Image (cartoon, rainbow, N blue to C red):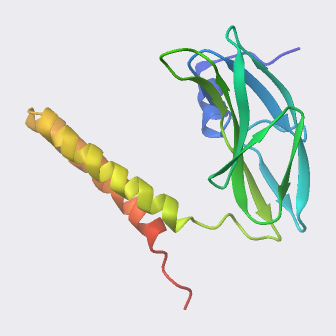
Amino acid sequence: GGQLLTWDSWWEHLAAGGGFVTNGPLLRLTAAGKHPGHVCKSAVPVTLTLTGKLDSNCPIDRIELVQDGRVRPIEIPATVTIDRGGWFLVRGIVKVPHTCRFASTAPWYAEIGGEPMPPASGDAQFFLGWMAQRQATLREILTEPEQRQALEDTYTQALDYWRALASPVPDP
């Protein structure tokens, strides 16, 4: 028997990292039998097998592994070797003229040797820059004081988060 889908169980699954994005194709994968959102913990480097499939009404252009921000083409089934803490996801891109159609899994995570995934300062810098651009654009668009204040409150929290990752405090 399957699990009953409820509003709460849907949110719990999403919070655990079990989501995906798509605007057409359907990508269903597991890594060593585990769904996206799983944290692989190992004392030593590991190699995981990715299995599943990508379904699309349009021709498939490529399937890519994105590991710690680096992209490489793969075919399913594939293997991914993890030798340090980090993350990976898989995305599939299909051929459609005049638009981009793709599907992406949520990430899987890895903690190797008891070390959690290190923060990536470069990634944090990217999001700080991107948020500054979006914030400037939205300040121009939003005219209602309540909307602008909600924007500022949200952006302040997010910017604080990314600033902390961009320049971690050294250990004493």
Compared with 48, 24 (above or below) is above
| Count of numbered marks | 0
Q: Position of residue 135 (x, y in %)?
A: 24, 46
Q: Position of residue 22 (x, y in %)?
A: 59, 22
Extreme residue toward the front, this view = 97
User: Which quadrant holds the C terminus?
Assistant: bottom right
Residue at 21% in and 38% down: 138
Compared with 133, 63 (above or below) is above
User: Which quadrant holds the N terminus?
Assistant: top right
Q: 172 and 80: which one is in front?
A: 80
Compared with 90, 172 (above or below) is below
Residue at 48% in and 16% down: 98
| Residue 4, picture quadrant | top right
Compared with 44, 20 (above or below) is above
Residue at 50% in and 64% down: 122
Is 73 left, or right, of 6 in this rendering?
Answer: right
Residue at 72% in and 20% down: 60
| Residue 91, picture quadrant | top right
Q: Position of residue 25 (x, y in %)?
A: 66, 17
Q: Position of residue 129 (x, y in %)?
A: 34, 56
Q: 79 and 155: which one is in front?
A: 79
Extreme residue toward the bottom, this view = 172
Is 57 left, or right, of 130 in this rendering?
Answer: right
